[in-house]
Image (tube, rainbow, N blue to C red):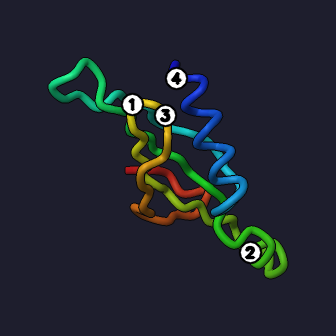
Amino acid sequence: MNITDIMHKVSSFFEEHIAPPHKITAVEPRRGEESTDGWAVIIEVYEERDYMKKYAKDEMLGVYAVTLDKDGEIESYSRQSTRYRSAVDS
């Protein structure tokens, strides 16, 4: 699988099961004994978008780490942090 396929698969998964994607910030191969054991992806998604709009608050983004196996199937994901969309990373 190429990076574009990985990005599409992760975006589709989050759109369907978690929350609407904002952007993918990293896609990296996981290295092991074989040439590639899978992929590691960092994705930002909108958290509680409707609630935040209703109360005129800045949108919250959740930052998730995702792992995929060498066939491109999602093995796991976990939220690493949340931040306001307008916040600048330090």
For label 3, the crowd category at 10 Å Cα-Cα, with few meaning under 14, some 14 to 19 and many 20 or more, is some
Given contact means CB atoms under 8 Å apart, are the residues at marks 1 and 3 in contact? yes
Give the class, few, some or many, for how many residues have Cα within 10 Å of label 2's Cα (few <14, many ≥20). some
Q: CA distance from mark 4 to mark 1?
A: 12 Å
Q: Looking at this view, is 14 or 68 the one in front?
A: 68
**What residue is pinned by disc 1?**
70
Residue at 77% from the left image edge and 78% from the top image edge: 51
Mark 2 or 3: the one toward you: 3
**Residue 74 percent location from the top left of the image:** 48, 46
- Nearest the eye: 33 or 64: 33
Q: Which residue is mark 2?
A: 52
Spatial CA distance of label 3 from label 4 is 10 Å
Q: CA distance from mark 2 to mark 4?
A: 32 Å
Please name the amino acid that badge 1 sits on.
Lys
Q: In percent of the image, x 84 and y 78: which residue is there? A: 54
Residue that numbered label 4 is attached to: 3
Q: Secondary structure at mark 4?
A: helix
Q: Label 3's element?
A: loop
Question: Which of the two labelled residues, at mark 3 and mark 4, occupies the earlier sequence position?
Answer: 4
